[in-house]
Each structure stands twice: as C-alpha cells, then as structure tokens.
Image: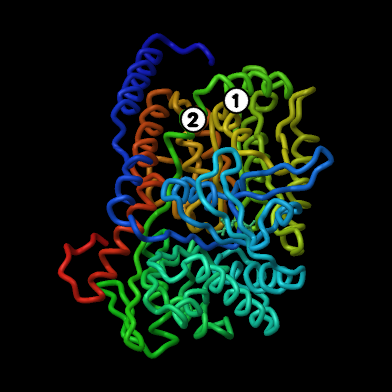
Amino acid sequence: MASFPRRVKAALHRAADRERVRRDAPPHTSHEDLLRWARQHLASTRLIVVSNREPYSHLRTEQGVRWTRNPGGLTVALDSVVSALRGVWVAHGSGSADRQRSDPSGRVQVPPERPAYTLRRLWLTREDQQLYYSGFSNGALWPLCHIAYVRPRFARPEWERYLDVNRRFAEAALEEAGDGPALLLLQDYHLACCARFVKERRPDLPCILFWHIPWPNPEVLRRLPWRAEILDGLLANDVLGLHVRQHALNFLDSVADALEARVDRERMAVERAGHRTWVRHFPIGVNAAEIAALADSAATDAAVRRLREEHALGEGQIGVGVDRLDYTKGIPERLDAVERLLEKHPRWRGRFTFIQIGVPSRVELPEYREVVRQVEAKAARINRLHGRGDRKAVLLRIGHHDFRDIVPFYRMADLCAVTSLHDGMNLVAKEYVAAKTDLQGTLVLSPFTGASRELERALIATPYDVDGLAEALHQALVMPESERIARMSALRDAVFRSNIFDWAMGLMDTAQRLMLRSHGAEVTPAPH
Ligand code: G6P
C-alpha cells in the first residue's frame, strides 16, 4: 500500500475497526437464519430450483474428468440456498462428462466436494440447444429485454422448440416433486412457459419465477409475435419476481396492453381466469460474508503478490472489470474510456493498468463473437499507444475462471468498472464491494444496472459519455482517502444488508404469505 499521511492512516484504522465490529455482529441475514426459516416453513416441502444453466458441470479433460462450479452470478448465488435447504436442482446437463457422472435418470449429488443436494440433469440435443437456447432465449428474448441495440430475431421453429423444452423441464420438475408438497423456484427467461405446463398436471404446486433480466415496456414487447403466450406462461406462476420495481411495473403494463386480465397496480397483482399472480421486486445479492473471508485469506494474499510480480504492476494503480463477454456489458465503451483517461491524464501512463477479465459466452451467436473481436482490438490498440515497457495499460484475461481466482483481482483493484448498457442487477458490483474488506477501492457504476438502485454511494457514470466515464475513472484514482473509505463503508453496509440469504428468504417468505392471501387466509400484509 502506498504511504499515507498519519491522519489518513488513523482514519483507515478507525474504519477497519468499525469493519471488524461489523463482522462480529453483522447486520445481515445469515446462512443460519435461512436454515432456521426453512426448517420452520419448508419442513415437509421439497424445494425444487429449475434453471437452464447447471450449478456444476463435469468436464472431460486430458487428466480425466474434473468438475467446475458455474461462475454465473445466478448459480453461484442459488447454490448455497439449495444446499442449505437440501433441495433439488433441475438444469440442462451441458458438461462433456455430465452423463458419465450422473445416474441413468440424470441425477448426481452436488456440490461435488461436499454433497448436499440432488442435481437432476436434463439432456438436450444439439438442435434443442440451437433452437431453444441460442435461438429463442438468446437471439430473441435477451436482446428484446435489454436496451443494447442488437435487434431480436424471431423464428417460429425456435419458439416451438422453446415451448417443447419448457415442457420437458416441467416434466422433470414434476418427477422430482412426486406426489408430495413442493415449492418450485423457476429461474429466468429460458423458462417463461414452464409453470404453465407444471400447473396443467399439478395446479396445487406453488410456482415462483424469478426473472433475472430487465422487463421491457409494452411498446418494446409488442414486437414479440408470441408475447401473449409468454405473458400467459408467466402468469401461471403464483409469484413473479424481478430485481427492480420499474421492471415489475413494466410487466404489469405489458399484461394490461396484451391480455384480458385484471391488473391491480395498487397491490401489484394480476388476476386472470381465476388465478392470481403477485408481481414483486426482490433485489438479489451475493454471499458477502463468504467473499469477504476469501478476500482476507492467505491464499488471496499470495495470489495478489504473484499477480503483481507476474504482470510488472509494481506499486501502480489498478482497475478491474469482470464480465461475461456480452454486448450488454458495455466493455468496448469502458475500454474507450480507459483510452481517453490515458490521453487526457498522461500521468497515468505506466502508472495505471486496467485488467479486464472476460468470460467467453454464447459464442454460437455472431454478436457475441463480435464483442470478443472488438475488445481484443481495443486492448491491443491501447497497449500500442500507452503501454510502458513490461507494463501494459490494459491486461486482457479471456477465459473461464474459478471464482476463487477472481477474488485476488478484486482485492488488488483500486477501482472496479461496471459499465453495463442495461443489466437486471449486476452481481460483479456487489462482489467487488464485498471483497474490499480494507475499504480501499472505488466502484464506478452504470446507472443502467439494477445494482445502482441500492449502491448509491458508487461513482455513477453513464457508459454513453466516454469523456464522463474517463473522468469518473480519474476521480476514482485521485479520490481522497476519507471519501473513499466513507463511500466503501456505505456500499458495504448495503451489500451485507441485502445479501443472497436475505434475497432467498425474502422471496420465499413473501411468496408464502402472498399465496396464503390468495387463498383467503388472514395474514400480516407482506411488505412491497
Ligand atoms: C445472465 C442470465 C442467467 C445466465 C447467465 C449466464 O446472468 O440472467 O440466466 O445463466 O447470464 O449466461 P449463460 O447463457 O452462459 O447461461
């Protein structure tokens, strides 16, 4: 760490003390709270999570079969919940050695290092993946729901296969539920019609769907030729969750625009054909305590020292970005801002490195390959113009990373840039904050993320204004210690307060109360 005046060091120590106190008596929902809640409320109910992406994959490698934990925020987040509740997770078995490691019905116990729940794998053909996953899910729904200027493509065979695959997910979930009580927690835009198929066979099974991406306004949704069917599928759920209130309101407006239904904006509910769907917002969080512990570990310390040496980072300042290589994440815009920063403030040349960790994603689609091309070209250009000897201006690390390998980057970064053009939540922002146990870091955050609603003390900067974003990066680098500490403390309060266990408990507890209300029971009104 650079040397600070005594006054600043004292402030640092005071803040670090406060931090320690917070860790002793954390003002947040813990793993144990969730377990306690589950024992009380779900004792005889089977929790079944259904998502497209599986939490663990088995891969064939030259050294034999190995497993990986999926790095996506969603799966990292829900894994601890299903473990805690000893539930079941139904997902597409996408790993090259998944079949080898599953029983004939596709079941395997996970997490592999300490089995706690059943992962029920569903097998999809190459054509299923092409039509349902790359086609309708990621070629139509994803660009439709994100304001990022990629035109959605609609094709009837893709839509039909999407429906068919949703039916198969529903059948697998029904098998796992058996005849007993269960709670289905469906995840995301891949499964919009799943609950409809579940309810055809078991109308009594409560279904909650959490939509992790933005919901567009009615005018945008009108372009979708099957919008009535998608809305109808979602309304088979008892509760529909989204990250932010605006998207919940957009959903209600979309229903009013497309269907015959009673839309109750006051109570945030839709009634249709005798069934009620509650629409609520629940901002998702991270396992903040676990990330903080990892950031403070000796292994992370050692990794930070190794990385600084390996990349000739010296004592210079470091920025980091961690993203799937997706056109919604604003990575080219971010690199443009880094270039502008180095042009406008030459003092950072050779004294600032921006590390971009990019996880290849959905590469079957041309728009995603284009992101990789752009990012590589921009990084090369910036290094040519502004690199200094061994020290690069932009360090690009493209590949699949274990979460443990990402934490050292958070730990050593003086700033983290999250510059999404549109994002339901963005958990990288929260992970970075959770990892900054020494309070030495600044978050630069796009206002188009769900996270910006909660993380108000970040430096909010729009990715559409390169100069403004470059200035925000500069401001982060020169920010007085006291302000940096104050901002990071406030951010950490927010991230710990609304963590993953809080999200899971809030979602399921509210859902239970609301469903009782649908059936006429007298219960305390749940908070909006
Ligand atoms: C987003 C979606 C998730 C998805 C993740 C990774 O966060 O909301 O549902 O799992 O991206 O994308 P992938 O296509 O690799 O599953």
Secondary structure category for the residue under label 2: loop
Q: Which of the pair 528/377 is nearer the observer?
A: 528
* Residue located 42% across and 88% down the image: 259
* Residue located 64% across and 60% down the image: 106
**Closer to the observer: label 1 or label 2?**
2
Tell me residue 212's x, y (percent).
49, 60
Q: Which quadrant of the structure image shows residue 238?
A: bottom left
Q: Which mark is residue 130?
A: none
Q: Identify which amino acid the numbered label 1 is placed on.
A: Gln
Q: Is residue 163 above or below residue 3?
A: below
Q: Which of the pair 114/218 is nearer the observer?
A: 114
Q: Identify which amino acid the numbered label 2 is placed on.
A: Gly
Pointers 1 and 2 in contact (CB under 8 A)? no
Q: Which mark is residue 317?
A: 1
Question: Is the distance from the Cβ of mark 2 to the nearest ligand 1 atom less than 8 Å?
Answer: no
Q: Is residue 474 above or below residue 512?
A: above
Q: Residue furthest right?
A: 62
* Residue located 47% across and 28% down the image: 293
Q: Is residue 357 left or right of residue 476?
A: right
Mark 1, residues whose alpha carbon is within 10 Å: few (<14), some, or many (≥20)?
A: some
* Residue located 70% across and 83% down the image: 157
Mark 2, residues whose alpha carbon is within 10 Å: few (<14), some, or many (≥20)?
A: many
Tell me residue 398's x, y (percent).
73, 42
Q: Which mark is residue 441?
A: 2
